[in-house]
Image: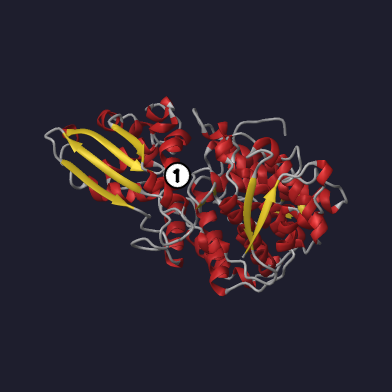
């Protein structure tokens, strides 16, 4: 890997294109390296993972709304939409919108956390949509997805957005544009312009993940993917972009991030170096914010040690800065303690999540968020006894670059009314690469079967799994097999709008 110094340059010190981060990103996208077998296998795992969570969310309101908007933009030979089968085709950018929203809705797919955080599986819907519309093969798609993961993961390693309250999809626009560039075999100049345009139009604030969290949390990455497709289209037609988008004196870095004194070191593969960033990422066994994964597993273990929840005096979760300030009591969001809060808000309340996981010994993507579950009196009482505190040791592990040290868990202290304490900790989730039961292909397939049970016909489940596992060998015509059809009459249409 090469560490690229990224600093702000005034107009009087104009930075050459070849020295700009966007150009270096584009150069990685045009570097046609051979992919390692384990990288290809992991890409297949994540395609299956995305499909499982998308189908589980297929009739939730935001997904129905996005799908209805997409279906209003039909295109012969376009891209497919989850739930509709291979015969239904829409414009690629609208397929990315519908499918990306479905994937993101349950907050249940893969994650990468470092200087910032991300869901790199959000690259899959826009890149797949363009692949289907432009007649690319499975091998083309796999190479493109490796680029998307590579760029997003390395941006997340180096550039913190949330510190400045900028939403993490600002790293997704450039990564998706770069991945599409690899897919289409575009030149460095075109990808460079597309990356800059994509970053320029996908910067937004983190209010979408603060306070009363709405369904926009699901739409945000699909919107970034849609804008990335449009940015590539414009760049292919010869249109330029605000430049240099990272290093200019009025750039994203200068005006939205660390300012004119900023200094970032962004790692990117050297020419000819394998693209392996997807191997640094991890998926979710439980449908909740990733920082809650280890704490959910820990709660399952600790909950067995308490016989009467009324005997609990208080519970302290000792954890990292991010967990405390984003999904913990450090956020200062009263909504995180509100039994009437939205699912999106409960998903970002580690206090609620731990209370339910302790009591139930399970976590379910529907039952655990049901209004009647959130409002259960004994759960509310326990929930309101939970608080989080930051421990700098856990924060250091969160930001560690050594994978054997990096952790997203914490310690739970259950204090009983009689003075006893029950204390335990967990660094990484069971499903993590270094966890007790690291996930393999069979686990992704099991997740798909669980989440699609009762929604898909058994034959459709088997057909999709066979198709996805053969991804690298699929022809352009066979790529439509990654679409999934629900039984006729089971897709909800949503409310009418303008389209």
Q: Quarter of the image for the N terminus: give it.
A: bottom right
Q: Nearer the viewer, residue 278 or 247?
A: 247
Helix, strand or loop status at disc 1: loop
Residue 367, image quadrant: top left
Neighbourhood count class around disc 1 (C-alpha, 10 Å): few under 14, some 14–19, many 20 upward: many
Q: Nearer the viewer, residue 87 or 278?
A: 278
Q: How is the image coloured?
A: secondary structure
Instruction: Give the vertical position of 338 relative to 76 (above or below).
Output: above
Taking the spot 33% from the left edge, 42% from the top edge, the residue there is 318
Place of residue 80 in the rendered image (x, y in percent of width and height, measured from the top left):
67, 53
Q: Nearer the viewer, residue 325 or 17?
A: 17
Disc tally is 1
The answer to whether any part of residue 485 appears in the image is no
Q: Which residue is mark 1?
A: 289
Place of residue 498 in the rendered image (x, y in percent of width and height, measured from the top left):
72, 30
**Residue at the extreme left:** 418
Instruction: Give the vertical position of 390 relative to 153 (above or below).
Output: above
Place of residue 81 in the rendered image (x, y in percent of width and height, measured from the top left):
64, 50
Taking the spot 27% from the left edge, 31% from the top edge, the residue there is 385
Q: Quarter of the image for the C terminus: give it.
A: top right
Left or right, 210 with respect to 155, comes to left
**Residue at the extreme right:** 238
Taking the spot 56% from the left edge, 31% from the top edge, the residue there is 207
The answer to whether any part of residue 153 appears in the image is yes
Place of residue 211 in the rendered image (x, y in percent of width and height, measured from the top left):
49, 28
């Amino acid at each position: 890997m090469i560490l690229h110094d990224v600093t702000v340059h005034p107009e009087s010190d104009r930075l050459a294109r070849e020295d700009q981060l966007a150009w270096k990103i584009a150069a990685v996208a045009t570097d046609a390296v051979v992919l390692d077998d384990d990288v290809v296998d992991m890409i297949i795992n994540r395609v299956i993972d995305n499909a499982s969570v998308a189908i589980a969310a297929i009739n939730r309101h935001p997904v129905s709304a996005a799908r209805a908007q997409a279906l209003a933009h039909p295109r012969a030979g376009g891209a497919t939409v989850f739930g509709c089968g291979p015969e239904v085709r829409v414009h690629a950018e609208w397929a990315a919108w519908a499918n990306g929203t479905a994937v993101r809705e349950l907050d249940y797919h893969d994650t990468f956390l470092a200087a910032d955080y991300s869901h790199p599986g959000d690259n899959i819907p826009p890149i797949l949509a363009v692949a289907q519309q432009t007649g690319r093969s499975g091998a083309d798609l796999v190479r493109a997805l490796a680029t998307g993961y590579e760029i997003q993961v390395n941006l997340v390693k180096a550039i913190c957005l949330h510190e400045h309250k900028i939403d993490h999809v600002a790293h997704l626009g450039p990564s998706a544009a770069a991945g599409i560039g690899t897919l289409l075999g575009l030149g460095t100049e075109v990808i460079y312009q597309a990356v800059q345009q994509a970053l320029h139009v996908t910067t937004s604030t983190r209010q979408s993940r603060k306070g009363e969290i709405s369904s926009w949390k699901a739409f945000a990455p699909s919107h970034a993917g849609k804008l990335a497709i449009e940015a590539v289209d414009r760049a292919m037609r010869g249109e330029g972009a605000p430049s240099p988008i990272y290093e200019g004196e009025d750039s994203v870095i200068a005006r939205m991030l660390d300012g004119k004194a900023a200094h970032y070191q962004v790692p990117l593969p050297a020419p000819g170096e394998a693209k392996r960033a997807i191997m640094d990422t991890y998926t979710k066994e439980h449908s909740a914010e990733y920082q809650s994964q280890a704490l959910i597993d820990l709660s399952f273990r600790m909950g067995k040690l308490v016989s009467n929840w009324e005997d609990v005096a208080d519970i302290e979760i000792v954890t990292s800065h991010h967990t405390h300030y984003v999904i913990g009591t450090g956020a200062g969001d009263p909504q995180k303690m509100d039994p009437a809060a939205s699912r999106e808000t409960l998903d970002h309340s580690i206090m609620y999540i731990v209370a339910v996981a302790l009591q139930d010994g399970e976590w379910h993507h529907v039952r655990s968020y049901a209004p009647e579950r959130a409002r259960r009196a004994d759960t509310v009482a326990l929930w309101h006894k939970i608080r989080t505190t930051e421990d700098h040791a856990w924060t250091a592990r969160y930001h560690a670059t050594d994978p054997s040290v990096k952790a997203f868990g914490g310690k739970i202290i259950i204090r009983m009314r009689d003075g006893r304490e029950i204390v335990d900790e967990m660094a990484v989730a069971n499903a993590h690469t270094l966890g007790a039961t690291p996930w393999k292909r069979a686990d992704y397939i099991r997740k798909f079967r669980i989440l699609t049970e009762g929604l898909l016909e058994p034959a459709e489940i088997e057909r999709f799994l066979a198709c996805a596992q053969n991804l690298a060998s699929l022809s352009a015509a066979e790529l439509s097999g990654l679409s999934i059809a629900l039984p006729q009459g089971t897709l909800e249409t949503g409310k009418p709008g303008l389209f």
